[in-house]
Amino acid sequence: MNSRGGTPGGTVEGRVPEDLAVVVDATGTITVWSAGARQLLGYEAEEVVGHPAAGLLAAELPETARRHVAEGRRWATEVALRHRSGGRIVVRLKAIPLADGEGARPWLVTAAPEHMAGPVEPGAEALWDLTLAQLPLPVAVYDTEARLVAANEVMTRVMGRSVAEMRGLTLWEIEPNPPFDEYDRLQRQVLRTGEPLFHENFGQAPGEVRGHAWSMFLSPLKDGSGAVRGLSAAVFDTTEQYWARRHLSVLNDASLRIGSTLDVTRTAEELAEVAVTGFADFVTVDLLESVAFGEEPETVLPDRPLTVRRTAQRSVLDGCPESVVPTGERTFYPVDTPPMRALIAGRGNRPGPLDPGMREWIESSPARAETVARYMIHSVLMVPLRARGVTLGLVHFLRHRTAEPFSEDDLLLAEEIVARAAVSVDNARRYTHERRTALALQRSLLPERPPDLAAMEVAYRYLPAGSGADVGGDWFDVIPLSGARVALVVGDVVGHGIHASATMGRLRTAVRTLADVDLAPDELLTQLDDLVVRLDREEGPDTRDGGADAPTPGEVGATCLYAVYDPVSRRCTMARAGHPPPAVVTPAGEVRFLKLPTGPPLGLGGLPFESMEVELEEGSLLALYTDGLVEAADRDIEVGLNLLHGALADRAGPLEETCDEVLRAVLPARPADDIVLMLARTSALDAAKVRTWHLQRDPAAVARARKSASEQVTAWGLGETSFATELIVSELVTNAVRYGDDPVVLRLIRDHALICEVSDGSSTAPHLRRARVFDEGGRGLLLVAQMAERWGSRQTATGKTIWAELGLPDD
């Protein structure tokens, strides 16, 4: 059988493959494409199956062939076909209708002998029967009871039985095992309805040693009156097309399922899950130890063994019994072994079962050798995980349930799957590294534990966002102030990532600095607002272009709540900048959200902030938090506030337990933002630890103040501090009498330190200066600074207060 084919513009002769077979359905669409057809025309099955057969014609069919197609009669003639390269091939084909010619029917197209042309006349039936018997496709004929009448040689070979052994039997009687029960049912359906059927299945035929994909055409055989006299079965081996579809399915599955999260371990698990679904029977993913922990991968050296971590593994068997290394454990690749050679080469390999290196690798571990023998592992692929030119690990694909060994096409598919997964693994590794860095930076900028406060008990929780989001810029702080007062601050920087954490650190430092100056809450927020505006202006074009998380102009912003509690007066002064309102719980369990003036978020500039002062009962609970606690994509903020209200009611237990109970009750199911919760239980300073004197602006008042202070510290049992106290009181009262205005007030507080405070009606702030040798004054504050552990001044509503702290003597 010859053909005349060639390149574009020419025609040459070539030999027609003997296994040429194409099936065209009733609509003219190609449904089966054999290897011989691919060899003849150059098209792969996936390029033509499902497409019109007319697209392969380089010229119309001859008139005789077209007429017999319309009549449903067999024909044979020369046909001009279009080669994939664009050339024209003339080949002699024969076509057999798979059902009789009552309208359109599926057709089997094969190569025709040179002497066979046109419709097959009755005189040629014997020759035609001989042709059918010798077709390279399994063909069989059954009677009206689905009992075998005849079968060609290929069918007997597939079934593993001769025609004599099968004649007169149904398929279920010939092979009483699935899927032959289904085949028998389909045959009886064709005999009953008189309609042809097409069926696909993958399985192992009785006469075969491995599975095949079969496409089966069952066609009724009718006489001239249209009565069904039997049926024919034509079977095509479409294994190549089956595996091509499976490969495409695996690739599609890989693109959809791998990389759904930015977690290294989960990405490796997704790779293993995809590979086990329709490709391999057992898959392991070993990552370099540094990659498994989100760090930069180390260099793989050919002369050194490599330590890897079994990050994921999946099997078609429950529990991965084939595994010799548990998930999460370390294992080693010795020098010059197949895994090391694959990693060094940077490409996949397909070592054969008799490969000496492979045998040595298997036998080097008794557990591995036992597993290979027990589960009859017969085929292996080793493919390196590489992304952006860097090796991340190695993936093993193994087969034991699937009879087909891995082919070169399978190796290409495995490399494609692994290449896609490697990018996702590397992205997850980079994300993990950046997030860990940002989280470490953020934690280093946050307080490790609450300070020891006499007038307040504080507990807090900080929860970074989940693995699906970058670390945010939430922060909190507890700052001891002068006069036994305490400042509480909670803030939230706009954005996520390292930039947000760095901005948070700058704002937290600024708040501490401004708190040391003892600014009122509204003034502190005004200063902080100016700082955020400057930070935004400092973010020049070079900075913004340098990172994905760098803000654009106007995007450096934050919210903040700042509160100052005075345990002497039990009054708390608060101001907020775009932050959620704080909640107060009374000792009786009543919860209310304070209606603080809503200031603008930090960074807008030029807008005022207002403070509000509230008196808190001793034992009150103050709750400060960030919006991540009460806001969520699936619920309104009012829902979160109501949950918080309910969670805080009747919480009189330890603060640490209360924090956990509040989080359990209020926390969103999937937090998308960082969360800060800070609880502070207030107490009043014992009146016996505070002593106040109102002084007149008279130089004689200095001596009286000095004497009263000395007597008081002695009464408190702090006689060792008497001299230092007298000196500090003398200098501070002298300055107030000499330079200040009425009223002049002296106050001593015994807290964690002995605090001396002198207030007057002047707002002029004091400052240290160096006195010259012959100056009579100017040394007072210098002496105070030398004697005290800390000193400073703060503005008040009526003037200023200068304070100094002395350490308490050891008990």
Image (tube, rainbow, N blue to C red):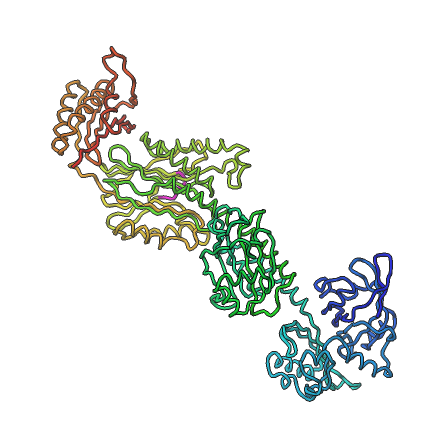
Give the side of residue 551 with respect to residue 696, left or right.
Answer: right
Tell me the residue at 74%/71% (across/down).
25
Residue 278 seen: yes
Q: Position of residue 334 (x, y in %)?
A: 51, 54
Q: Nearer the viewer, residue 669 or 35?
A: 35
As for residue 222 lying within the magenta part, the answer is no
Q: Is residue 316 above or below residue 694?
A: below
Q: Is residue 473 above or below residue 537?
A: below
Q: Quadrant of the N terminus?
A: bottom right
Q: Magenta stretch: give its range.
A: 577-581
Give the side of residue 330 with respect to residue 753, left or right.
Answer: right
Q: Nearer the viewer, residue 349 or 650?
A: 349
Q: Position of residue 355 (x, y in %)?
A: 60, 62
Tell me the residue at 82%/77% (across/down).
74
Give the side of residue 19 with respect to residue 719, left or right.
Answer: right
Q: Position of residue 413 (x, y in %)?
A: 62, 59
State whether the magenta stretch is mostly helix, strand or loop: loop
Q: Quadrant of the C terminus?
A: top left
Q: Quadrant of residue 175?
A: bottom right
